[in-house]
Image (cartoon, rainbow, N blue to C red):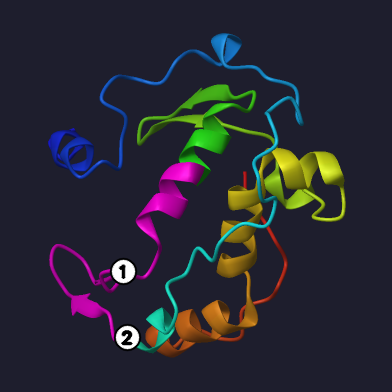
């Protein structure tokens, strides 16, 4: 909870709690079409060549290099996801609003492409062979599959 003010100050969280899902339900494709349906890249050009910071405290983790993701693109993804129907989930570790499985989005479906262009661009970037290779090199893990699993 002590990180929330810092995340809000960095613009990564809304200034107020998210609205209940019943107030945010918009049918897919109801959003006005923008001038361009092609989303700009989410990963910054050349970003995967940057070496992230390795930090052992409080547990081994990696901090992504500054500028890895385009900040405006991520804010646009958050805005798109806020318009989807969500279900509140809570455990002893976290509270989250969960959407349906975003792996089922079809880039060839014009409704999906028009309603969630930035979200699909982020999904494509995270599951790209280049990004998976970067994660593998960084962590030393075995081959990562291209199976999309996100909700």
| Rendered location of residue 124, percent (x, y) | 64, 65
Secondary element type, mark 2 = loop
> Looking at the picture, does residue 34 appear above or below residue 53?
above
> Looking at the picture, does residue 26 appear above or below residue 58?
above
Among the 4 quarters of the image, the one containing residue 50: bottom left
- Quadrant, the C terminus: top right
On screen, residue 117 versus residue 14, left or right, reads right
| Rendered location of residue 31, percent (x, y) | 68, 28
Q: Residue at 14% across / 41% down in the picture?
A: 6
Q: Residue at 47% across / 39% down in the picture?
A: 78
Q: Residue at 42% across / 83% down in the picture?
A: 48
Give the camera-side residue of 127 and 26: 26
Write down the residue under mark 1: 67
Give the camera-side residue of 27 and 142: 27
On screen, residue 150 versus residue 66, left or right, reads right
- Quadrant, the N terminus: top left
> Looking at the picture, does residue 49 appear above or below residue 114?
below
Query: Which residues fall within the magenta stretch?
Result: 51-76
- State the mark number for residue 50: 2
**What is the residue that sits farthest to the right in this orientation?**
109
């Amino acid at each position: 909870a002590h990180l929330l003010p810092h995340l809000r100050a960095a613009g990564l969280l809304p200034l107020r709690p998210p609205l209940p899902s019943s107030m945010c339900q918009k049918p897919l494709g109801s959003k006005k079409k923008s001038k361009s349906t092609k989303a700009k890249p989410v990963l910054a050009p050349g970003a995967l060549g940057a070496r992230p910071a390795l930090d052992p405290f409080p547990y081994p983790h990696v901090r992504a290099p500054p500028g890895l993701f385009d900040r405006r693109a991520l804010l646009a993804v958050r805005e798109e996801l806020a318009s989807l129907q969500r279900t509140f989930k809570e455990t002893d570790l976290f509270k989250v609003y969960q959407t349906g499985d975003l792996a089922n989005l079809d880039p060839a479906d014009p409704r999906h492409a028009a309603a969630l262009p930035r979200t699909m661009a982020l999904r494509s970037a995270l599951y790209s062979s280049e990004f998976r290779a970067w994660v593998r090199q960084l962590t030393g893990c075995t081959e990562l599959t291209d199976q999309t699993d996100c909700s």
